[in-house]
Image: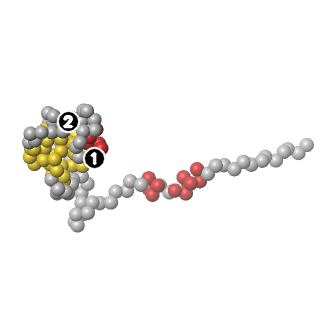
Amino acid sequence: MYLGVVTGTVVAAQKAAGLEGQKLLLVQPVDDTGRATGDLQVAVDTVQAGVGDHVYLVGSREAALALTPWFVPVDAAIVGIVDGLHAPARAADGAPEPVDDDPTVANDSAPIAAARKRPQATRKPEPRR
């Protein structure tokens, strides 16, 4: 899934089977700051987006599954219109701040490893008589 901005429409006199009646839009892929990240592409519209809308898209097989019937010949499908976007602040060089999302690093792994060890069977000494 990736972000894009609709920049125009595409008109096709003939379409492949399964694409009849589907609206085609010209989309510029962008990153979370709005900078272009790739070439313009044609995407089938499943959510009634318009020119100037920020959208999110799926590509490849997922794009083909976004339509009915499934497996139509498309490379990109618009599956949502973005209402708002919250992105973490960026450092001065434009690189995103590192995110600590690895739970094994945040916690000490020694207790976890010890807890995963299977307890060894111990024999209790028999009482003396």
- Give whichever of 102, 20 is nearer the camera: 20
Horizontal arrangement in the rendering, residue 11 relative to residue 44 (left or right): left
Instruction: Name the amino acid type tagged 1.
Output: Ser
Horizontal arrangement in the rendering, residue 102 relative to residue 6 (left or right): right
**Secondary structure found at label 2:** loop
Q: Which mark, by number, is residue 60?
A: 1
Whether 90 is drawn above or below 80: the answer is below
- Give whichever of 17, 89 is nearer the camera: 17
Residue 100 image position (x, y, % from top left): 37, 56
Residue 42 image position (x, y, % from top left): 16, 47
Q: Which residue is mark 2?
A: 17
- Few, some or many C-alpha atoms within 10 Å of disc 1 (few <14, some 14-19, many ≥20)? few
Instruction: Name the amino acid type tagged 2.
Output: Ala
Horizontal arrangement in the rendering, residue 114 relative to residue 78 (left or right): right
Residue 77 image position (x, y, % from top left): 21, 42
Q: Are marks 1 and 2 in contact (CB under 8 Å)?
A: no
